Amino acid sequence: MRFYYSVGSRYSYLASTQVGKLEREMGCQVLWRPLYSVDLYELCSASPFEGEPVSGQYDWDYRRYDAECWAEYYGVSYKEPRGVVEFDPRLLARACAAADALSTMRSYSESMFKAIFAEGLPEIGEGECLQRAEVVGLSKDAFARDLASPGPERRLAEAAEEAHSAGAFGVPSFVVDHRMFWGKDRLVLVRHFLKK
């Protein structure tokens, strides 16, 4: 099973908090695939975030409220970053892709999700990305070299192409045996499919 996510996405964060439980309950293994969601929207030739919200579910205040409700349901921390945390979503996506090349992408992504949505840091820049790499056991120098190389951008583009080819149009998305499930609330359908 593949989990396509963007580390700057509140719903990707919420889904990520449930992946371990899903693996334990279903005896499956989830492959984490970071991408930059704008790349995916460009492949789909549509973005729900351009112009006026296409429906109430894309209104920022509703999204905050909805995420808080889901976090309470899941029993996880959630702090709305909008207007509080300053970060460049492409940099954070590149950082996750750099960690992927160094085989610690899942723990690194979990750390970045926490930085954005649970710890309430005022700013997440390159320095924080490097520090978190060291915390999850990466060589800061090796991580900095890969982050500065073209590799992460290439890996992000590949992940977006792969997700798009599987039918994904947003994050989070799960792909199981060529079936695509979009949204953290579809995890119940992922479980149902795996049980069959």
Image (spheres, grey):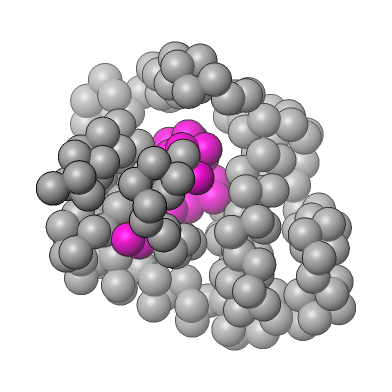
Q: Quadrant of residue 137?
A: bottom right
Q: Residue at x 50, y 45 (%)?
A: 20
Residue 4 drawn in magenta: yes
Up/down of 72 relative to 76, above or below: above
Where residue 83 sits, quadrant-wise, is top right
Q: Who is closer to the viewer here, 68 or 31? A: 31
Residue at the spot 80% in from the left edge and 81% down from the top edge = 142
Q: Residue at x 39, y 71 (%)?
A: 159
Residue 121 in percent (x, y) is at 77, 35
> 150 or 24, which lies in front?
24
Bounds of the magenta span? 1-20
- Where residue 18 appears, x then y in whole percent? 46, 38
Does residue 20 sit above or below 83 in this rendering? below
Residue 112 on the magenta segment? no
> Which of the image's four quarters has the N terminus?
bottom left
Tell me: residue 109, above or below residue 166.
Answer: above
Left-right relation of 115 to 110: right
Percent x, y of residue 157: 41, 75
Vertical relation: 130 (above or below) 185: below
**Residue 91 in sight from this viewpoint:** no
Nearer to us in this view, 1 or 37: 1
